[in-house]
Every structure is written in structure tokens, then in C-alpha cells.
Image: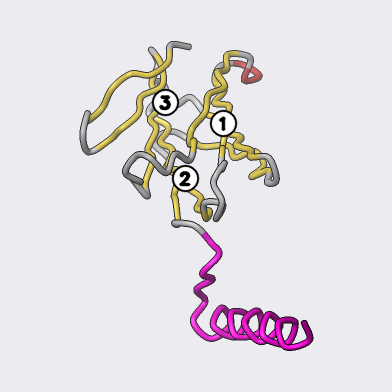
Amino acid sequence: MKNITILFFLVVLALCMIDNAYSKNPFKGKLTTLYFRNDLSHNKWLKVRCKSGDKDVHEKYMGPVHDWSFSFHDKFLGGTLYWCTLSKGPDYKVHRTFDAYVQDNRKPHGTYYSYIAREDGIYHITMVYGVRKVLDW
């Protein structure tokens, strides 16, 4: 039993050293980036707020034709979910909340998930489908 405890400790120590030396943690999932673009007309601003179960990205106010993104690692055992609220209009009263990223290990992982806010709705850009509208305001 003592040998197993020492072996476990050495494995954990080695993994920590690898993480520090190469900035790669074998227990982190794939790196994912959520990307947002304000394409609203008439110089309107867009407010974006994204959250997950353990992280609040806070609010980001985006000027006209402004881009913003943030990155995160998938959870090693799965279950990563980020939902975002995009808001527009006076006092940002018009808003939509949606799942911007849901980790699904059964599907190919796309590393970048891009969203564009336009006057008529929110669009998602993918390599497979191109630009497609996913939500109305």
C-alpha cells in the first residue's frame, strides 16, 4: 500500500512539472474560443455576457463593428457549457440568452465558435454551414 501511495504521488508530481514546464496540462480539454462581432446598424452598441457553471466572463460592451473573444479549456471529463446573453437597444432591454458552447465529445470539436449580432437576429458561423441565423431578437 505504501508503494502505491508513493507511486501515485510521483505521477501527480510529474504531471505538475510537465504542466509548469510546457504549459500543457494533460487533464485540460481542448482549447475553445468564443468570438462575437457587433454588426448592428446605426452605430448601436452591443452588450455581451457569458457564463459557465464555474466562470463568469463578465459584461463586455462592444462598439459598432467591434470584435471580442475569449478562450477556455473544455473540462477533462466533459460537461463544459457556456451560455451567453447578447443585449441591444436603449438600456440594453432587448436581449437573447442562448447556449454558445456545449461540449459534446461525440461530435467533431470546432475550436472556434463565432457569433454575429445583426439588427434582425443573432447568426452563427461554421465551416460546414457558413453563416446561418440561429435566433431572432
Disc number for residue 68: 2
Residue 14 sits inside the magenta stretch: yes
Q: Amino acid at mark 1?
A: Cys
User: Residue 134 occupies which quadrant of the picture?
Assistant: top left
Give the residues in magenta: 1-28
Q: From the top left corner, tell me how far across and down residue 50 is, in percent.
A: 60, 37
Marks 2 and 3: CB-CB under 8 Å? no
Q: Earlier in the sequence, mark 2 or mark 1?
A: 2
Q: From the top left corner, tell me how far across and down residue 64 is, in percent.
A: 43, 33
Q: What kind of secondary structure does the magenta stretch mostly adopt?
A: helix
Q: From the top left corner, tell me how far across and down residue 115 is, in percent.
A: 39, 32
Q: Is residue 78 left or right of residue 105?
A: right
Q: CA distance from mark 2 to mark 1?
A: 13 Å
Residue highlighted by disc 1? 84
Q: Residue at x 64, y 45 (%)?
A: 57
**SS of the residue at dot 2?**
strand
Q: Residue at x 78, y 86 (%)?
A: 2
Q: Residue at x 51, y 69 (%)?
A: 26
Disc number for residue 117: 3
Q: Amino acid at mark 2?
A: Trp
**SS of the residue at dot 3?**
strand
